[in-house]
Amino acid sequence: MSLTKQQMSIARTLGLAMVVSLGLGACATYDDDFARINTRLDSLDSQVQGAAQSAESANQSAQQANQRLDQLEGRVQQLEAAPGRKPRG
């Protein structure tokens, strides 16, 4: 049973069509995967930005607290250096 040139051509065309369809089908599944990955990356990016803003806010609060402590330290030193009071009565 020998295949003719026409049958070989048809077989080659069908084989090529199957390979192309499988290739395109695989790309479609990767598109869904890439979309999920991009969504996850966007979510992580938002979380990182939120954490950075929280850290910046905490840093500013800490700086303000340190300034307040520096002011109080001067006042405490003045009170400690002041002469003692004599009790009344």
Image (tube, rainbow, N blue to C red):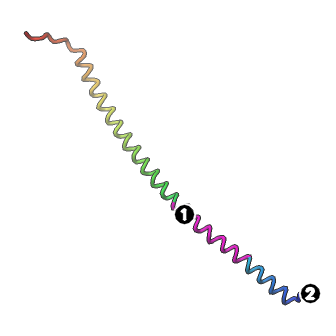
In this view, 6 is above or below 60: below
Q: Is residue 86 left or right of residue 49?
A: left
Residue 26 colored in magenta in the image: yes
**Secondary structure beneath label 1:** helix
Residue beneath the point at 37% across and 41% down: 58
Residue type marked 1: Arg
> Which residue has dot 2 on it?
2
- Mark 2 packing: few (<14 Cα in 10 Å), some, or many (20+)? few
Q: Mark 2 touching mark 1, by CB under 8 A? A: no
In this view, 21 is above or below 32: below
Residue beneath the point at 52% across and 57% down: 41
In this view, 50 is above or below 37: above
Residue type marked 2: Ser
Q: Quadrant of the C terminus?
A: top left
Q: Which mark is residue 36?
A: 1
Q: Which mark is residue 89?
A: none
Q: Closer to the N terminus: mark 2 or mark 1? A: 2
Q: Quadrant of the N terminus?
A: bottom right
Provide residue 86's location: percent of width, then percent of height: 14, 10
Q: Residue furthest front?
A: 1
Residue 25 colored in magenta in the image: yes
Q: Which residues are magenta?
A: 19-39
Provide residue 6's location: percent of width, then percent of height: 84, 90
Provide residue 81's location: percent of width, then percent of height: 24, 14
Provide residue 50's location: percent of width, then percent of height: 42, 51
* Figure quadrant of residue 80: top left
Residue beneath the point at 80% across and 87% down: 10
- Mark 1 packing: few (<14 Cα in 10 Å), some, or many (20+)? few
* Figure quadrant of residue 17: bottom right
